[in-house]
Amino acid sequence: MGSNNNMTLIERLTGRDNFASWKFAVKTYLEHEDLWECVSGTGEVDPKKDVKAKSKIILLVDPINYVHVQDASSAKEVWEKLCKAFDDSGLTRRVGLLRDLITTTLENCQSIEEYVNKIMTTAHKLRNIGFKVDDEWLGTLLLAGLPDEYKPMIMAIESSGVAITADSIKTKLLQEVKNRDPSVFFVNKSKNNKQLFKQNKQTKGPRSTNNNNSGWYVDSGAAMHMTMNKDWIYDETPPPIKTIRVANDKELRVESCGKVNIHVKSKNGSTNSIQRLGHLNYNDMKKLKDHTDGVTMPQNSELTCVPCIKGNRQGHHFHVKTSTPYTPQQNGLSERMNRTLLEKARCMLINANLQKSLWAEAIRTAAYITNRTPTRALNYKTPEEVWSGRKPDLSHMRIFGCEAMMHIPKEKLKKWDSKSCKMIFVGYCEDSKGYRLLDPKTKTVTKSRDVVFLENSIKTDTVPVTLSDTKKQQVSRNSLSESSDCSTDISTHTAVESDDGDEEYVPEQSIGTPPTSNITLRPHNRPNPKVEPKSYLCMANVPQTYEDALSSEDSELWIKSIKEELKAHEDNGTWELVKKPDNVRLLDCKWVFRVKNEESSTRYKARLCAKGFAQKSGIDYTETFSPTVRYDSIRLLLSIAAEKRMTIMQFDIKAAFLYGKLEEEIYMKPPEGLDVENSMACKLIKSLYGLKQAPRCWNAKFNSVLNKYGFFNSHADKCVYVSSNREAQVYLLLYVDDGLLCSTSPTIITEVLNHLQKEFNVKICKTSNFIGIQIEQCKDYIFIHQRKYIEELLSKFDLDNANPNSIPADPHVTLQKSTVLENKKCFPYREAVGSLMFAAIVTRPDIMFAVSTVSRFLNSHDQSHWNAVKKIFKYLKGTLSFGLCFRSNENNTLESYSDADYANDPVTRRSTTGYVFMKNGAAVTWSSQRQTTVALSTTEAEFMASCSATKKLSGLDNYC
């Protein structure tokens, strides 16, 4: 039992990320079990021990990696194969680890323990791959990553003469953590103290003498300190020593030992109060003393605040003018309030160095502060006091934009997760007692009351706030400009705070920077009653028309992209200019503009599209159908490629639709930007984006090119091309403009690609992701899966932190049509089922039955159906690494299995057909579908299932 318990404590080998720690743990475990000689020994080993060691090593490997050790015959061979596969000691690995080691600092870690562990772990990894790490250099590096607050400790180490080693510095740092008890030392100006504790409410002790000079100098390098005032000491313990010797060589008796609270006044306490109150002016700050509680008053009227100067600096005169009719913006009182709020918000954004996209949160906070500061209109009382009849308490005020550590509820935590996360304070809750916090990672605003603020640690870097694609919340449609003269109608009444509720952690809305392309905003259907659409997006100025492009600020860039597009069509021969024919309707066209953000630059793209919606059947087009390769064909060809160890290459054809030639005679109006006479028209020779027949024309063009080169279409799938008249057989699969080439001869693949490049603009890609399928090819197998797609789905539907399920459906639950009229917008049922269906028909036959079952209730679903959908997601969460693995050494015979679930539908009593075809160790095609008629017996239902499987088999036999 003890041995098995030790095995369960070792994390399974998943890949290169945890190989180093796994290798150390397994070696230690085998040494403990007296089995290490089976791996390291060169002589003969006990066969029983060898089998035992081999089985233990394999059982500590994740099943997805079994393929690396299936052919191993001994424990030593298993160990060597795993080391060869996962032990990365190349230059890239060394450079990455060395960079991590050098750039690690205490400021980037949550605690000293984490900092020390990270340095030592990285150094150990470097040593494991053969990189020499000097012990003295490592100890010096531990000191180099400390902030300025640790300089006295470094000086003390230097003067002590202690040898600088990694172990000695590590011990000293960990001892420093123990000495710096947060309940004893609370220094407000410390920037790097990540663990903050509430200071005990204890007043300063009385003076022991009449001497007012009672300053106490604390030596941070000393292990003990002395005080002459016993009243300051609490938590007394017996003194470790009886006497001490002082500077004049006298001995003094030690009476007591304990802890003392040190009260440190912040050097910028008054400035903090100004920043918390939205940079209130000095005169109003003085009036706060009589009308509010919980705020520190500035003692110096000449106190300089740089954000106040940047955000509030004005001239010395304010002229009042009467307003003209129908111009409320000239109302001096309202506009002055708007200006006050705008200046407060501007100062807060400047002080926190946050992006302007957070202006809505800043305005909201400015209005909250204004309601709690004196105003002359109310005889220098605060609006809060007039409204509620009591003085407002400002002790909860904090600096806008400062860092904050938010407590995470235990319901949202896993066992080893951190209990707090770093956020940015952006305001106060009006409907509950809490703070509004921005998560810089997910770009969402959250409510919480359990927060520790780091007011003196405002970063100088700009916080990157962008719109999250995977967690869009409800966003207002109002788009406001960021011009300085914009006016926002802000309600000045004070919201009454509600009592504490149970739910203190409430995700709200995403806040985004101006996007660089057109975005259609729509409310998210996800159930979230706490969502408050009070933030706004500033839309990027992407032109919608040709005239907009010419009049925009970036008109030169748009004109350049338009000319490039027209030049491309001229070189391609897309049209020819002719005189406008009589009695012929001209098809219109339009420019579509996009801004593409690339890694190193921003590219302005203009594309000419025909208005195909105006085409008429039989006049402008006849046929529009264009085939694409089926997923059954992809899986079958990949299984053949794995069986014959073929080379696979992926390619993409740029602007594919422009290569197709039109059969119909279509005339188009000259595009804007093309300098031609009004009497001219464009006679289209080749297809254009937007035309209904463009995909069909492209497919016909590609088909003719391949047929001339010796390829022929498969009878089962017209987008599978086969060439057998060469040294080796070649398969080509086409999905619109993406293709796969498979052959046992890399030379022939190169020849085919060269031929395609003569006809089209071909981009050769790495075979890793083909139309949503992730492909991993090794020597003996091809593994296809959709891990990335499933992870995106889990994140999209807020189930990425859900607990995994072991099965995709509950066998004891029978779903039926809902008879209750519920709001179907409460959950995105159709969207979720459609997303799951794509995974089920591509690489996940294990969820096919469950998905096909929930898909029957797209128009009649309720909470029970949504729970069934979530169960499928939770099953996928626990099986992310599942996929289809085609092996070269497996049985290459096509195997088929079929069955039927008799009368499983409680309403129609129709049965469900299921079949699967296996080849080279994995499924190539499968189905789970309700039968079209009612079977009278189980035998009849199974015959119907066998019939469906036979029809599918006849289609598979047509592959050449």
Image (cartoon, rainbow, N blue to C red):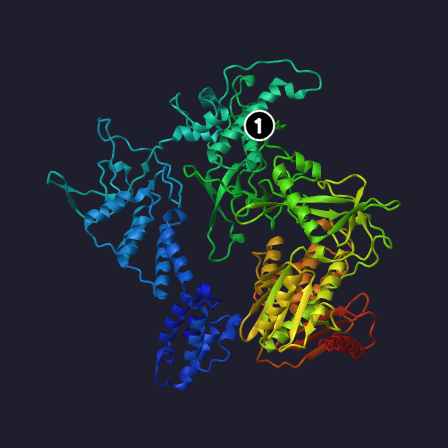
306 over 642 or under it: above or below = above
* Quarter that holds the N terminus: bottom left
Judge the density around disc 1: few (<14), some (14-19), many (≥20) Cα neighbours within 10 Å: few
The residue at the point 74 percent across, 56 percent down is 861
Q: Amino acid at mark 1?
A: Ser
Q: Position of residue 376 (x, y in %)?
A: 53, 17
Residue furthest to the left in view is 249
852 over 341 or under it: above or below = below
Looking at the rendered structure, the number of numbered marks drawn on it comes to 1
- Camera-nearest residue between 319 and 661: 661
The residue at the point 88 percent across, 44 percent down is 582
The residue at the point 84 percent across, 57 percent down is 622
Left-right relation of 464 to 333: left
Q: Position of residue 835 (x, y in %)?
A: 67, 58
* Quarter that holds the C terminus: bottom right
Tell me if residue 809 can be seen: no
Q: Position of residue 554 (x, y in %)?
A: 61, 37
Tell me if residue 916 can be seen: yes
Label 1 sits on a secondary structure element that is loop
Q: Position of residue 955 (x, y in %)?
A: 75, 75
The residue at the point 39 percent across, 55 percent down is 99
Left-right relation of 309 to 31: right
Q: Quadrant of residue 57?
A: bottom left
192 over 384 or under it: above or below = below
The residue beneath circle 1 is 484
